[in-house]
Image: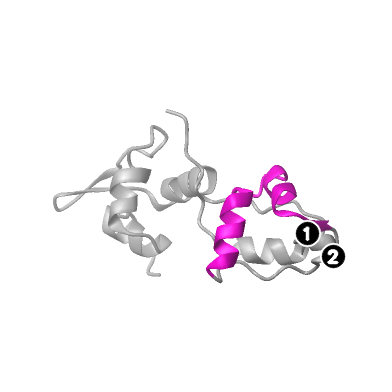
Amino acid sequence: MVDRPTLTHPEIAETYGVSLHTVTKTWAQNPAWPAPVGKRGRRNAYAPDDVAAFHRKHVQRPGPHLEPQRLYTARELEAAGVGITATTIRADRSRGRWPEPDDTSDGVNRWRGSTAAQALEGRRSYRRTAG
C-alpha cells in the first residue's frame, strides 16, 4: 500500500479488501464514520488514521477468547461470543467453509478452541451497529 495523506472511498475499499459498495453504503452510513478532511477531485477524502480507527472499532471482529485445548460445540462457540451463530457454523461446515470437528464422540461435533480460532481468523465481521 502506498502511503497517502488522504484516502477516497475507492482507495479505502482497495486498502481493506472490500467492495466500494461496502464502504459507501455500509461503513460510510454509520454515524461513527469519520468526517472528511478535504476533497480530491469530486470525492471526499479521509484521514487514513481516522478510517483505521473506525475499522478497528466497528468492523474488525475481536479475536475469540477460546481455550486452545478445550473442546467446544457449535452452541458453546456461539455463546463464547465468536461472532457467528451455531447455525452458521453448521451451514459453513456443510459447504466446506468450516473445518471438520476434532472430536465426534457421542455423536456430538466438537472443535478445539485453537481449531475454531483459526477458522474464525479470516472471517469478516457481521456485527451490526445500533443506530
Question: What amino acid is at disc 1?
Answer: Val
Q: Residue at x 68, y 71 (%)?
A: 100
Q: Is residue 93 magenta?
A: yes
Does the rendering let one see residue 21? yes
Q: Position of residue 62 (x, y in %)?
A: 62, 50
Q: Is residue 34 magenta?
A: no
Left or right side of 85 for 10: left
Looking at this view, is 17 or 125 the one in front?
125
Left or right side of 28 for 84: right
Question: What amino acid is at disc 2?
Answer: Ser
Q: Residue furthest left?
A: 42
Q: Residue at x 40, y 53 (%)?
A: 48
Question: Quadrant location of residue 27?
Answer: top left
Find residue 108 and name its label.
1
Does the rendering let one see residue 8? no
Q: Residue at x 35, y 64 (%)?
A: 14
In this rendering, the answer to whether 110 lies above or below 24 is below
Looking at this view, is 114 or 11 the one in front?
114
Q: Position of residue 3 (x, y in %)?
A: 39, 64
